[in-house]
Image (spheres, helix red, strand yellow):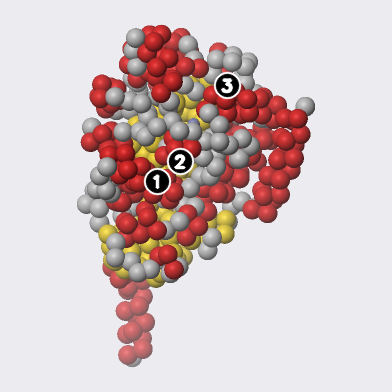
Amino acid sequence: MIRSFVSFLFFVTVALAEPADWIVTAKYVVTMDGARRLIEDGAVAVRGERIAAVGQRAEILKRFQAKARLDRPAAILLPGLVNAHAHAPMSLLRGIADDLKLQEWLEKFIFPAEAKNVNPEFVRWGTRLACLEMALAGVTTYADMYYFEEVVAEATKEAGLRGVLGETIINFPVPDARSPADGLVRTEAFLRRFQNDPLIVPAVAPHALYTNTEETLRACRALANRYGVPLLTHLSETKTENDDIRAKWQASPAQLLDRYGFFEGKTLVAHAVWVDEADRKILRDRGVGVAHCPSSNTKLASGVAPVVAMLAAGLAVGLGTDGPAGSNNDFNLFEEMDLAAKMQKVSTGNPQALPARQALEMATTLGAKALSLDREIGSLEAGKRADLITVSIEQPHAVPMYDVYSQLVYALKGSDVRDVMVNGRLIVRERQSLTLNAGAILAKAGEFRAMISASLRK
Ligand SMILES: [Zn+2]
């Protein structure tokens, strides 16, 4: 009798429980929600592609009956990181030419190496390598600007990552287009093909103001607006670029782009190192997102972006790795958070500048906002996409822990990431990719190195 009563109770509990696909539990849940809730002994329930609930572990376990569990009593659970600026296929050019000036690096090495080697196969394997590296280091969404972007999109979907992927438009012949007009035709086909994709936001990526004409820039804006997609570009990366534009047009790059109507729609600019107060006002008034790339800006000696001032002005400033050929040799958002915080401190002479939690905001909520994806990703909240990561906290550099944000930004590494879920699908478990063949990708990277080196000797 007692036994049947107990099983009856069990039956009632299970029957009343809400269904879920996953419950992920962790020592700490860093939600990055509006209240910046930090839940000790917390959990997230996932149903389909979205987060069903976030709360105390006991409460979530009681409320949901999940098909699968991931219990991480020695980990932090947080939103997946957003890499707001990268060139994924360039992973195959990692370290090809370092310690050079930007123009020399571009003109003597990168553009020739690309002209000789970039084709769909290069892009496919380069993207696979980049996605493997990013996923293992906790990046769940990345923004990209390259060629054959439809191949980047295919490889990104295969990896299970989320991408805002921009087809490059530039005013000289490139591997996938003879002219900007050609590039725009390709881009439109790309936008059509990936419209409404659950993982890919296709985008238009005019390389920069200084590598495109006014006519092309206006055409890029019109095309992006026709499909409701973002424009991605590089802006005010170096002082030389700014000085040249000012000398020629008596306007800053941001002013000139504004004059062209370039910011009238979703826009993300990478770098924004040399933006003054007037420029920041334009970017803020037009709702332009910024990808701050601290490793790239230091490595190429581009300067220190006024991040504190941009954030104070209310700009959505995310973090980007750029690269990884020359401008930064890896895709590690943990490094970018750490460096971003430290660069602001040293450049302002104020150790309180850009504190740890704000650096983490840049890598999550602000990055999502910069990419116009803040309604879908960037925080752990019911209704948002289930993009989340767990980070181990039992290594020597992870203990003791007094402050979760400080630990994440100043002590923990990309290699501490243990599990990664994107859009409700587990793509990394126990530091192993579940979607990509790591052995084959690493072997292929070696083959490309040999081919690319030989091509540069010809
Ligand atoms: Zn870039």
Local crowd at mark 3 within 10 Å, few (<14), some, or many (≥20)?
Answer: some
Local crowd at mark 1 within 10 Å, few (<14), some, or many (≥20)?
Answer: some
Of marks 1 and 3, which one's residue comes earlier in the chain?
Answer: 3
Of marks 2 and 3, which one's residue comes earlier in the chain?
Answer: 3
Local crowd at mark 2 within 10 Å, few (<14), some, or many (≥20)?
Answer: many
Give the quadrant of residue 272.
top left
**Is ligand 1 closer than 8 angstroms to the Cβ of mark 1?**
no
Q: CA distance from mark 2 to mark 3?
A: 32 Å
Asked whether residue 57 appears in the rendered view, the answer is: no
Q: For mark 1, what is the residue?
A: 339
Residue at image position (37%, 66%) is: 26
Asked whether residue 438 appears in the rendered view, the answer is: yes
Q: CA distance from mark 1 to mark 3?
A: 37 Å
Cβ atoms under marks 2 and 3 closer than 8 Å? no
Is label 3 in a helix, a strand or a loop?
Answer: helix
Height in image: 180 above or below 334?
above
Closer to us: 261 or 410: 410
Q: For mark 2, what is the residue?
A: 295
Horizontal and vertical percent position of residue 293: 42, 37
Q: For mark 3, what is the residue?
A: 186
Q: CA distance from mark 1 to mark 2?
A: 7 Å
Cβ atoms under marks 1 and 3 closer than 8 Å? no
- Say left or right for 291 vs 162: left
